[in-house]
Structures are given as structure tokens and as C-alpha cells.
């Protein structure tokens, strides 16, 4: 510097008004530039470059305030203080501070400024010191999170998104419900042409005297006649109106377009010539004038003598006569085998001929011989009449056709109903009994298997694990950053206690964790999934989320010692959380499926239980497994409530459901918290760190030896800092030190 001091000062203050001259020498001027004016630095440096010659400046440089300079200034003031032994040097750092010619490092907006000696304030120690240190760390974490908006998004938005997706999948997935009931009708059987229903037994009734006929029960011929009614057999095509004109029934019913006016279920009728329309519309009083004394003479059998096949699996019949066939409105065909004396042999010998088109038969006019002939049959003795019936009807069913038994019971019930309707009720074809077959309640084991395979609790737990894996991993960003930049080291040098540092960071991280955890619980509540929000289940879910935060945060801390790049630590921990949680959940889930498929496999059951106990060391598994067990328990409670087994209903707060997971997470959090402190204090390294190696002075220079002797003898009094017996160890491949 060869120019005028005033010209240089004027140029600097024009660009940065707050700048001032700090120190002047023959060759150098030192100015203080405030940090708040850093946005003017580029323009200021450009002006200096352009005016170097006019200001006679050979060059300029930037210098940061060093810790050594601050230390020297503080000790200088400390020596001048009359009460140096009782005073304390206090350093103030703020955003409006000043520094030598430039800002501090790009990682901090605060600068070390002039040191002041405060002799009026007592030294802060004890609990008050710990509180101030903790408050400082909390303020620092708040500022760090405020400036790191991407981390905030990772902690709140990503978990909320994943859990919302999980709930959407759970609500849109097919629910676990019983199949609907099946309407029983002859159309449920897949037959090639017609479904044949043999009718027999009427001839047996003619052997009885007409005086023995009940005066309030329909006779067998009335039952048989209902088959030819417009409703056919069963109740699939009932009439809309019991008082409908018979002419409309005869003519409008011939076309499919008008069947909606006639039939209740828009049944499409048939108009083939073999339908006996005249018999359909006769009143049930028509056949009372028939003679019951006539016995039909048997001319031919409807089967021939048959022999058993060589394989003894069927009968071989050379020939047989086909009985009279009659087509019904329901497209079924009845076979009148009334003349057959042994109807059981007929069914047996004709099985091969009607294997795919005969699933049942009807027999009327049968008599129970063990009932006395003078048993009360008049209307005044209805109670006795209900105890035993002399005249009965019988059905035959082929169990190869599913639901054939209840179907033909329904057909017989409809025949009895229509035959006994009073005349004033109108056309009997408008009345019918509809039967539905509902699925049978399966065993508890089968229900549990289907529940596990169809419910979405596993999907929900996996999505929640994926969502919550981002939260604890983001907490290590700050810790790795402070360790990599030596910020934590500087804080320890300045008196920060490691226990205070980790305790405060844990409290802050736990409070931060409550935000995404609360969002997750609120989303579960909004979607109103009963397994997670009803009664004690909701409290169990809250307990799992809270204990997960207690356990997973300390688990992340030890990994911060192994990374120097925050982004690498973040990605690694996310992968670890996802892998440990999802892999363990899926493994236990599939093992349980194998056990349900083979409940007698005791070895596999032992392996599964052992693996589930080992997996409990992972907090991610405990959270996911706890949610699954809560869902399973809710399902079983619903099942037991429906079946009346109230004594087997369990609260979720039992060991096998929630308590074991909570205890495992509590122990895991405590163990990893202690491990973090041990890593920080390096207590567990004390046994493996060797003693200092012996130092040889054979090759020591004379001047070095002289200074060493002076330091050891304490003959030097004008030094600020003295380090004695300091050595450095070097690592080599051959030797550890």
C-alpha cells in the first residue's frame, strides 16, 4: 500500500458504510467488514480491482477471525483485570457481529467478535449450566430444521403419503365376507336337455278307503296336480296376481315379450306343444270325483333285470321301458312311474341312464304302517296330528348334485302349500316358498387361513413401516453434519457435556417424531378402519407408535459415528429400516401361512416362534407386527362375539399381541441409548487401547531436547500455552502404531 489512507477508507465506506479501519501499519491497512453487508462484497471487490492503480493498492486479501486471535485478546484483557482469578472471559456470537475483512465460513452465519471481560457476573455452573447448554442445542436444532425444508417434507409429507396409500388400498380391496345365499331351483343344475323328476306312489294311496282321508289335508292327487300349475315346481316363476284371468294366462303367456305381465320374476315361458295348458288352469277341486278304489294293473316294468358289471361299479341293463314323460313350465320333465311296484330298484337300475339329468324324485301317497288306522285325523285334534302322520310323502335325492336335498324339500313344500290353499285365495300359482342356501360357518382354522390370505393388515403394516422409515433416518443428518464439520468437537472443547448433547438431541428428535406419528394416527382415525380405531385397539396403536419413537431414534445414533457424509448416512439408514422391517414381516407372515396349511408340523411351528422372537430386536418389525396382531385379534373377537364365545375375547393389551412388542421396543431403546453414550465416551475402548509406546531420545536434536527440558522444569513463564510430553503415533500396515 503506497496511497492515501483517506482515499482507501472513503472508497470502502462508499460501498460498505459500516466498515471501519481497525489497524494501520506502514505497508498494510486492516478494515472490519460487517457480515450483514456481505451481499455488497462482489460489487465492492470489483471496485477495488478497477481502482488499484488510482488508490496505489498492490493487492488485498481476506482474513477470518481465528480462535488463536480471540484467545490472545481474551488472555490479554484477563491479565489486565484486577480480579483475574475470579472473572471469566465471555464470548458473544450473533448474526450482527463483525469480522476482519470478510464473513466467516459458508456454513455459519454467526461470527466471533470482540471479546469483553465481564467481571460482574458469577460463573455459571451446575444445573443452570446444563440447562443453558441444552437450550442452546435446541435453538440450534430449530434453526437447522427451519432452514432445511426438504427434511421437514421428508418427516411429515412422505409418511402421510404412504399411510394414505395404505388406507386407500385397504378400503378398496375386496372385503372378507361370506358368499351370498344361493336361490335353490332346478335351473342351478347344468343339464344337457331336461331335468327329469320321477313321480311315484299314487297307486299305493288307492288301496285305502276314502273315508280315511283327512278332511283338512290335501290328498296325494292334489299334491301331484300342483306340478302342472303355471308355477311349475318350486317358486321360480310365480304369478303376479292370484286373481288373474285364465284367458290372459293361456294366451299372453305364449310370448316372451308379455311374460312380465304374468310372472313375478319375468320368467320366460315356453310354448312347445307338449305343455298341457288345459291342466295348468284347472282348479284344485277338479280331481275329487276320481275313484280311489281302482287299482292300476301293472303291465310292464320300467326296468329289466340288471346285472352287476365286472368292475362292480355299475349295473348293466339290457333294456327298459321309458315311462310317461311330461314337460313343465320350468323346462323340467316329470316321469310318471306310479305303476312301478319297487321304485327303489327303478332308481338303482336306471342310474347310468340319468346320471347327469336326474337329481331327485317325488313320491306321494305313502303310508306309515306303525301309525294306527284310528289315529286322530280330524281337525279338532291338531296337536296329536302334529305328533304323527299316517299319510306321508317322500323325496329321493342324488347327492352328486349339490343342494339337491334342500331343493327337493322345497319342491315338496310348495306342492303341499298350493294343494292346501283355500279356493278363495285365488290361483295357487301365485303363492310359493323360496329357499336360499347360505354358506355353512367354517371352522375357526379355515376362517383364520382365509382371513390371513384376504385381509389387508399386512399391506397396511408394510406401508406404515415404509412411511416411518424416513423419519428416524432424517434425524442423523444433523448429527453426521456436526461430526463431519468438527462442530461437535468444538462444542466439547468449549465445555459442552456429551450427556447433555445426546440427551438434548434425543428430546428434540422425539418431539420431532411426534409430528409424523400424530399425522399417521390421525389418518388412521380419518379412514376409520375398525381394527385400529375402535375401543382399546386405538390405544394400542398409539402405544406402538410412541414406543417405536423411543426405540428407533437411539438405534440410529450409533450409525452417525460411522459416516462423514450426511446424505450417505440418510440413504443407508432408510434402506436398513425398510429391509429389517419388511423382510421380517413378510418372513413371519409366510411362515404362519405354512403352519396353517400344515398345522401338524411341529418343527415348522417351533422355527416360526423362534424367528418371531429374534425379529423383536428390530423396532420396525415390532411396530408392523403389533399392527398385524391387533388386526387379527379384532377379527377373532368379532368371530367369537358372533358365535357366542365371549369368554375367548381378548383385549389387545396382552403379552402375545401388544405387550411383548412394547417391552421389546423399550429394551431396545434403552440398550442403544447406553451404546451411544459408550461410543461417545469410548468407555468400552479403554481395554483395547495400548499404553503409550516407550519414547527414545537417541535421535533427538539438541535444540529440541533443550526446550523439552525447559518445559519439564517449568523454567519458561512467558508462554501462554504449554504442552508437555506430547507424542504422535503413526499407523502402518506392519504395526498398529
Image: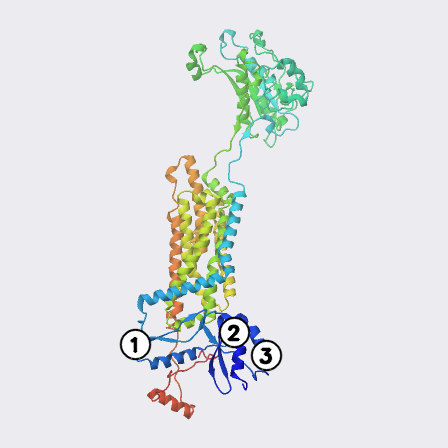
Q: Secondary structure at mark 1?
A: helix
Query: Residue 181: x, y in percent?
Result: 53, 31
Front: mark 1 or 3: 3
| Residue that mark 3 sits on | 49
Query: Residue 276: x, y in percent?
Result: 65, 15
Estimate how packed mark 2 is, as few (under 14), some (14 to 19) or many (20 or more) residues with alpha carbons within 10 Å: some
Residue 617 appears in the figure:
no
Query: Residue 96: x, y in percent?
Result: 45, 70
Left or right: 279 as drawn, with respect to 23 = right
| Residue that mark 2 sits on | 16
Q: Secondary structure at mark 3?
A: helix
**Which quadrant is home to the N terminus?**
bottom right
Front one among 87 and 313: 87
Residue 434 appears in the figure:
yes
Estimate how packed mark 1 is, as few (under 14), some (14 to 19) or many (20 or more) residues with alpha carbons within 10 Å: few
Distance Cα–Cα, label 1 vs label 3: 50 Å
Mark 3–mark 2 contact, CB under 8 Å?
Answer: no
**Which quadrant is home to the C terminus?**
bottom left
Q: Is residue 327 above or below residue 111?
A: above
Q: Is residue 405 above or below residue 114?
A: above
Distance Cα–Cα, label 1 vs label 2: 40 Å
Front one among 381 and 545: 545
Front: mark 3 or 2: 2
Ranked by sequence position, the earlier of labels 1 and 3 is 3
| Residue that mark 1 sits on | 86
Left or right: 326 as drawn, with respect to 115 = right
Amino acid at each position: 500500500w503506497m496511497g492515501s489512507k483517506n482515499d482507501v477508507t472513503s472508497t470502502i465506506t462508499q460501498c460498505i458504510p459500516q466498515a471501519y479501519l481497525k489497524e494501520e501499519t506502514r505497508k498494510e491497512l486492516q478494515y472490519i467488514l460487517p457480515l450483514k453487508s456481505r451481499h455488497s462484497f462482489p460489487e465492492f471487490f470489483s471496485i477495488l480491482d478497477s481502482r488499484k492503480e488510482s488508490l496505489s493498492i498492490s493487492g488485498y486479501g481476506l482474513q477470518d477471525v481465528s480462535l488463536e486471535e480471540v484467545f490472545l485478546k481474551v488472555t490479554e484483557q484477563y491479565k489486565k483485570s484486577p480480579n483475574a482469578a475470579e472473572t471469566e472471559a465471555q464470548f458473544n456470537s450473533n448474526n450482527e457481529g463483525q469480522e476482519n475483512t470478510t464473513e466467516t465460513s459458508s456454513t455459519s452465519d454467526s461470527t466471533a467478535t470482540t471479546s469483553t471481560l465481564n467481571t460482574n457476573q458469577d460463573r455459571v455452573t451446575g444445573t443452570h449450566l446444563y440447562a443453558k447448554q441444552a437450550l442452546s442445542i435446541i435453538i440450534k436444532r430449530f434453526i437447522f430444521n427451519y432452514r432445511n425444508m426438504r427434511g421437514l417434507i421428508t418427516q411429515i409429507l412422505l409418511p402421510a403419503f404412504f399411510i394414505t396409500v395404505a388406507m386407500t388400498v385397504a378400503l378398496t380391496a375386496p372385503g372378507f365376507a361370506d358368499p351370498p345365499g344361493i336361490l335353490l331351483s332346478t335351473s342351478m343344475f347344468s343339464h344337457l336337455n331336461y331335468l327329469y323328476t320321477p313321480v311315484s306312489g299314487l297307486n299305493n294311496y288307492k288301496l285305502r278307503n276314502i273315508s280315511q282321508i283327512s278332511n283338512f289335508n290335501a290328498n296325494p292327487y292334489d299334491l301331484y296336480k300342483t306340478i302342472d300349475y303355471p308355477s311349475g315346481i318350486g317358486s321360480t316363476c310365480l304369478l303376479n296376481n292370484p286373481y288373474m284371468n285364465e284367458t290372459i294366462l293361456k294366451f299372453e303367456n305364449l310370448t316372451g315379450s308379455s311374460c312380465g305381465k304374468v310372472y313375478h320374476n319375468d320368467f320366460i315361458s315356453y310354448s312347445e306343444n307338449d305343455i298341457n295348458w288345459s291342466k295348468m288352469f284347472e282348479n284344485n277341486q277338479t280331481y275329487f270325483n276320481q275313484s280311489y278304489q281302482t287299482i292300476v294293473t301293472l303291465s310292464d316294468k320300467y326296468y329289466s333285470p340288471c346285472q352287476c358289471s365286472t368292475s362292480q361299479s355299475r349295473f348293466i341293463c339290457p333294456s327298459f321301458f321309458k315311462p310317461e314323460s311330461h314337460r313343465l313350465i320350468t323346462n323340467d320333465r316329470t316321469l310318471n312311474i306310479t305303476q312301478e311296484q319297487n321304485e327303489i330298484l327303478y332308481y338303482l337300475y336306471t342310474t347310468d341312464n340319468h346320471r347327469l339329468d336326474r337329481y331327485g324324485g317325488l313320491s306321494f301317497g305313502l303310508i306309515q304302517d306303525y301309525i294306527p288306522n284310528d289315529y286322530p285325523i280330524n281337525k279338532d285334534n291338531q296337536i296329536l296330528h302334529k305328533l304323527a302322520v299316517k299319510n306321508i310323502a317322500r323325496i329321493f335325492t342324488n347327492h352328486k348334485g349339490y343342494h339337491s336335498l334342500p331343493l327337493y324339500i322345497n319342491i315338496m313344500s310348495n306342492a303341499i302349500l298350493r294343494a292346501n290353499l283355500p279356493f278363495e285365495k285365488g290361483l295357487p300359482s301365485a303363492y310359493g316358498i323360496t329357499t336360499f342356501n347360505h354358506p355353512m360357518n367354517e371352522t375357526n382354522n379355515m376362517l383364520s387361513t382365509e382371513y390371513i390370505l384376504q385381509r389387508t393388515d399386512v399391506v397396511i403394516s408394510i406401508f406404515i413401516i415404509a412411511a416411518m422409515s424416513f423419519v428416524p433416518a432424517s434425524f442423523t443428518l444433523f448429527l453426521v453434519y456436526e461430526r463431519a464439520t468438527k462442530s461437535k468437537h468444538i462444542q466439547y472443547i468449549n465445555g459442552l457435556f456429551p450427556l447433555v448433547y445426546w440427551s438434548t438431541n434425543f428430546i428434540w428428535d422425539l418431539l420431532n417424531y411426534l409430528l409424523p406419528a400424530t399425522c399417521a394416527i390421525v389418518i388412521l382415525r380419518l379412514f376409520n378402519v375398525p381394527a385400529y380405531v375402535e375401543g382399546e385397539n386405538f390405544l394400542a396403536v398409539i402405544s406402538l407408535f410412541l414406543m417405536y419413537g423411543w426405540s428407533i431414534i437411539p438405534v440410529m445414533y450409533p450409525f452417525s459415528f460411522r459416516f462423514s457424509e450426511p446424505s450417505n448416512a440418510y440413504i443407508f439408514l432408510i434402506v436398513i429400516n425398510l429391509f429389517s422391517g419388511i423382510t421380517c414381516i413378510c418372513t413371519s407372515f409366510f411362515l404362519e401361512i405354512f403352519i396353517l396349511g400344515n398345522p401338524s408340523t411341529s418343527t415348522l411351528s417351533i422355527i416360526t416362534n423362534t424367528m418371531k422372537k429374534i425379529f423383536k430386536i428390530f423396532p420396525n418389525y415390532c411396530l408392523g407386527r403389533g399392527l398385524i396382531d391387533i388386526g387379527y385379534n379384532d377379527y377373532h373377537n368379532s368371530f367369537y362375539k358372533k358365535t357366542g364365545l365371549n369368554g375367548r375375547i381378548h383385549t389387545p393389551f396382552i403379552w402375545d399381541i401388544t405387550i411383548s412388542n412394547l417391552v421389546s421396543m423399550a429394551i431396545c431403546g434403552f440398550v442403544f441409548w447406553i451404546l451411544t453414550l459408550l461410543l461417545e465416551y469410548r468407555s468400552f475402548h479403554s481395554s483395547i487401547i495400548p499404553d503409550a509406546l516407550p519414547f527414545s531420545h537417541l535421535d533427538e536434536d539438541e535444540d529440541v531436547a533443550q526446550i523439552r527440558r525447559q518445559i519439564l522444569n517449568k523454567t519458561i513463564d512467558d508462554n501462554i500455552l504449554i504442552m508437555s510430553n506430547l507424542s504422535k503415533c503413526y499407523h502402518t500396515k506392519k504395526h498398529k502404531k
